[in-house]
Image (cartoon, helix red, strand yellow):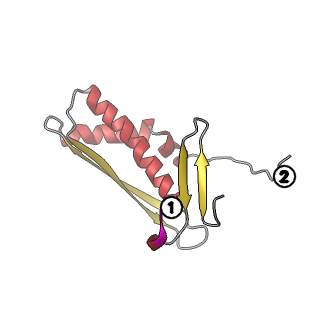
Amino acid sequence: MKADLEYEALNLQGNLVNIDMYDPEHKRAQSPMDLLLSALGSCASVDAVLMMKKKRREIVEFFVEVEGTRNDGVPAFFTDIELTFVIVSPNATEEEFAKVVALSVDKYCSVASSLKSNISYKSEVRRPE
Protein backbone atom coordinates (compact mmCIF):
# COMPACT_ATOMS: atom_id res chain seq x y z
CA MET A 1 0.00 0.00 0.00
CA LYS A 2 1.36 3.38 -1.01
CA ALA A 3 -1.69 5.36 0.14
CA ASP A 4 -5.32 4.59 0.91
CA LEU A 5 -6.20 4.54 -2.81
CA GLU A 6 -2.77 3.67 -4.28
CA TYR A 7 -1.16 0.24 -4.49
CA GLU A 8 1.66 -1.56 -6.24
CA ALA A 9 1.67 -5.10 -7.58
CA LEU A 10 5.01 -6.83 -8.00
CA ASN A 11 5.32 -10.16 -9.80
CA LEU A 12 7.97 -12.80 -9.20
CA GLN A 13 10.17 -11.35 -11.96
CA GLY A 14 10.19 -7.93 -10.27
CA ASN A 15 7.88 -6.16 -12.72
CA LEU A 16 5.90 -3.41 -11.01
CA VAL A 17 2.38 -2.22 -11.82
CA ASN A 18 0.94 0.87 -10.17
CA ILE A 19 -2.75 0.75 -9.29
CA ASP A 20 -5.04 3.50 -8.07
CA MET A 21 -8.69 3.91 -7.26
CA TYR A 22 -8.94 7.68 -7.67
CA ASP A 23 -11.73 9.44 -9.53
CA PRO A 24 -10.94 9.97 -13.23
CA GLU A 25 -9.75 13.56 -12.81
CA HIS A 26 -7.05 12.44 -10.33
CA LYS A 27 -6.20 9.07 -11.88
CA ARG A 28 -2.53 8.25 -12.49
CA ALA A 29 -2.78 4.48 -12.94
CA GLN A 30 -5.29 1.82 -13.86
CA SER A 31 -7.79 0.50 -11.34
CA PRO A 32 -8.03 -3.24 -10.64
CA MET A 33 -11.07 -3.44 -12.94
CA ASP A 34 -9.19 -1.53 -15.67
CA LEU A 35 -6.36 -4.03 -15.30
CA LEU A 36 -8.77 -6.92 -15.76
CA LEU A 37 -9.96 -5.45 -19.08
CA SER A 38 -6.36 -4.75 -20.11
CA ALA A 39 -5.34 -8.30 -19.23
CA LEU A 40 -8.18 -9.74 -21.30
CA GLY A 41 -7.46 -7.52 -24.30
CA SER A 42 -3.72 -8.14 -24.28
CA CYS A 43 -4.08 -11.89 -23.70
CA ALA A 44 -6.45 -12.26 -26.64
CA SER A 45 -4.34 -9.95 -28.80
CA VAL A 46 -1.05 -11.79 -28.51
CA ASP A 47 -2.49 -15.06 -29.81
CA ALA A 48 -4.39 -13.31 -32.60
CA VAL A 49 -1.27 -11.49 -33.77
CA LEU A 50 0.90 -14.60 -33.59
CA MET A 51 -1.67 -16.64 -35.56
CA MET A 52 -1.88 -13.96 -38.25
CA LYS A 53 1.92 -13.84 -38.53
CA LYS A 54 2.04 -17.63 -38.73
CA LYS A 55 -0.29 -17.30 -41.73
CA ARG A 56 2.25 -14.83 -43.15
CA ARG A 57 -0.13 -11.91 -42.95
CA GLU A 58 1.36 -8.45 -42.75
CA ILE A 59 0.08 -6.33 -39.88
CA VAL A 60 0.35 -2.60 -40.44
CA GLU A 61 -1.73 -1.69 -37.41
CA PHE A 62 -3.46 -3.68 -34.72
CA PHE A 63 -5.35 -2.77 -31.57
CA VAL A 64 -8.22 -3.96 -29.42
CA GLU A 65 -10.78 -1.82 -27.62
CA VAL A 66 -12.19 -3.42 -24.48
CA GLU A 67 -15.25 -2.05 -22.70
CA GLY A 68 -17.04 -3.50 -19.73
CA THR A 69 -20.52 -2.94 -18.36
CA ARG A 70 -20.65 -3.15 -14.61
CA ASN A 71 -23.29 -4.16 -12.09
CA ASP A 72 -25.04 -1.16 -10.52
CA GLY A 73 -24.69 -2.48 -6.97
CA VAL A 74 -21.84 -3.48 -4.74
CA PRO A 75 -19.76 -5.24 -5.81
CA ALA A 76 -19.68 -3.54 -9.21
CA PHE A 77 -18.53 -6.62 -11.14
CA PHE A 78 -18.57 -6.85 -14.93
CA THR A 79 -21.82 -8.17 -16.35
CA ASP A 80 -20.69 -7.84 -19.98
CA ILE A 81 -17.36 -7.27 -21.70
CA GLU A 82 -17.05 -6.29 -25.35
CA LEU A 83 -13.82 -6.64 -27.30
CA THR A 84 -13.44 -4.89 -30.66
CA PHE A 85 -10.37 -6.03 -32.61
CA VAL A 86 -9.03 -3.81 -35.38
CA ILE A 87 -6.40 -4.88 -37.87
CA VAL A 88 -4.97 -3.08 -40.88
CA SER A 89 -3.40 -5.59 -43.21
CA PRO A 90 -2.86 -5.56 -46.97
CA ASN A 91 -3.16 -9.35 -47.27
CA ALA A 92 -5.61 -10.54 -44.59
CA THR A 93 -9.34 -10.96 -45.08
CA GLU A 94 -11.95 -9.96 -42.53
CA GLU A 95 -13.24 -13.54 -42.37
CA GLU A 96 -9.77 -14.92 -41.73
CA PHE A 97 -9.12 -12.38 -38.98
CA ALA A 98 -12.53 -13.08 -37.39
CA LYS A 99 -11.69 -16.80 -37.20
CA VAL A 100 -8.31 -16.08 -35.62
CA VAL A 101 -9.88 -13.73 -33.05
CA ALA A 102 -12.55 -16.29 -32.16
CA LEU A 103 -9.90 -18.97 -31.65
CA SER A 104 -7.80 -16.61 -29.59
CA VAL A 105 -10.61 -15.49 -27.28
CA ASP A 106 -12.52 -18.77 -27.01
CA LYS A 107 -9.70 -21.31 -26.97
CA TYR A 108 -6.26 -19.88 -26.20
CA CYS A 109 -6.70 -16.85 -23.93
CA SER A 110 -6.11 -17.87 -20.33
CA VAL A 111 -7.70 -14.68 -19.01
CA ALA A 112 -10.93 -15.27 -20.95
CA SER A 113 -10.99 -18.88 -19.77
CA SER A 114 -10.45 -17.72 -16.20
CA LEU A 115 -13.39 -15.31 -16.45
CA LYS A 116 -15.62 -18.16 -17.64
CA SER A 117 -14.51 -20.63 -14.98
CA ASN A 118 -15.59 -21.21 -11.42
CA ILE A 119 -12.54 -19.95 -9.53
CA SER A 120 -11.86 -21.03 -5.99
CA TYR A 121 -9.70 -18.91 -3.74
CA LYS A 122 -8.82 -18.54 -0.11
CA SER A 123 -7.81 -15.60 1.97
CA GLU A 124 -5.59 -15.65 5.00
CA VAL A 125 -4.93 -13.02 7.62
CA ARG A 126 -1.59 -13.08 9.39
CA ARG A 127 0.79 -10.77 11.14
CA PRO A 128 4.36 -10.36 9.89
CA GLU A 129 6.87 -12.23 12.00
Residue 11 spot, x, y in % from top left: 59, 41
Secondary structure mostly seen in the magenta stretch: loop
| Neighbour tally class for label 2: few under 14, some 14-19, many 20 plus, Cα within 10 Å | few
> How many angstroms separate mark 1 from mark 2 (CA)?
33 Å
Q: Is residue 29 magenta?
A: yes
Amino acid on which disc 1 is placed: Phe
Say what secondary structure mark 1 lies in: strand
Q: Residue, x 75% and y 51% (percent of image)?
A: 123
* x then y, percent, for residue 52: 27, 33
Residue 24 percent location from the top left of the image: 45, 71
Q: Is residue 124 magenta?
A: no
Packing grade of label 1 (10 A; few <14, some 14-19, many >=20) is: some
Q: Residue at x 56, y 67 (%)?
A: 76
Label disc, if present, on residue 39 of the rendered structure: none
- Say which amino acid is labelled 2: Arg
Q: Secondary structure at mark 2?
A: loop
Picture quarter with the N terminus: bottom right
Instruction: Note whether 89 is above or below 125 in the view shown.
Output: above
Q: Which residues are magenta?
A: 26-30
Q: Nearer the viewer, residue 51 or 34?
A: 34
